Amino acid sequence: AAGSVRFEGSNPFAHGPGGSRDYHRDVAMMFQDPVSSLSPRRTVQALVSEPYIVHGLKARDLKAEARRLLGLVGLPAELLARYPHQLSGGQARRVGVARAIALSPKLIVADEPTAGLDVSVQGEVLNLMSELQQRLGLTYLIITHNLALVRHISDETAIMYMGRFVEQGRTDEIFA
């Protein structure tokens, strides 16, 4: 109900509730339920190339970009013609990651990035996120209830209670 958002020192919503176009290129989202966040009527190729269309970058070879993005997240190009219901949970999560990194964002907001995945797939997704962070220079804002995940992958942590930050700092200090 109150507060403000600052990204790189300024309010991205100063000119309206939708935020600036630059903000939407610089900040991407990974949704908690990857299958529900993917349109069931669109192929994987259409889904991962959609950010280019939305941001007016249609001159690119969208199929080549979709192949590149799938390669970055460890998925075979054969999945380009599939629909979300034809993917496993781990594959759908990786498609969500591919969409998020399409425009080379500076920040990815990841809502429960391992929710609903079995333990081995959770590890694969976390390793992928870490690899992409190193390779692409990404920053993640991870929203989760999984404190083991936070302890394992986060440099800094903020604890919320009833919608307010009650503790904030280096992850190792908070857990100590």
Image: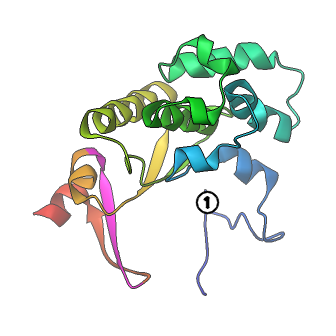
Q: Is 74 placed above or below 8 here?
A: above
Instruction: Report crowding for label 1: few under 14, some 14 to 19, many 20 or more residues within 10 A (C-alpha).
Output: few
Residue placed most toward the observer, 56 or 114: 114
**Which part of the image, by quadrant, shows the C terminus?**
bottom left
Magenta stretch: residue 158 in it?
yes
Q: Position of residue 148 (x, y in %)?
A: 20, 53
Q: Is 143 placed above or below 126 here?
A: below
From the image, give the main secondary structure of the stretch colored magenta: strand
Residue visible at 58% across and 42% down? 106
Location of residue 123 by image quarter:
top left
| Residue 55 is at least partly visible in this image | no
Residue visible at 53% across and 30% down? 87
Q: Is 136 placed above or below 38 here?
A: above
Magenta stretch: residue 154 in it?
yes
Q: Position of residue 30 (x, y in %)?
A: 54, 47
Q: Position of residue 12 (x, y in %)?
A: 72, 63
Q: Position of residue 161 (x, y in %)?
A: 34, 81
Side of 133 relative to 148 (left or right): right
Question: What is the three-letter code of the residue carrying label 1?
Answer: Phe
Residue placed most toward the observer, 14 or 62: 62
Side of 74 relative to 58 (left or right): left
Magenta residues?
Answer: 153-162
Q: Mark 1 highlights which residue?
A: 7
Residue visible at 77% across and 35% down? 50
**Which part of the image, by quadrant, shows the N terminus?**
bottom right
Q: Is 124 placed above or below 170 here?
A: above
Residue visible at 15% across and 62% down? 175
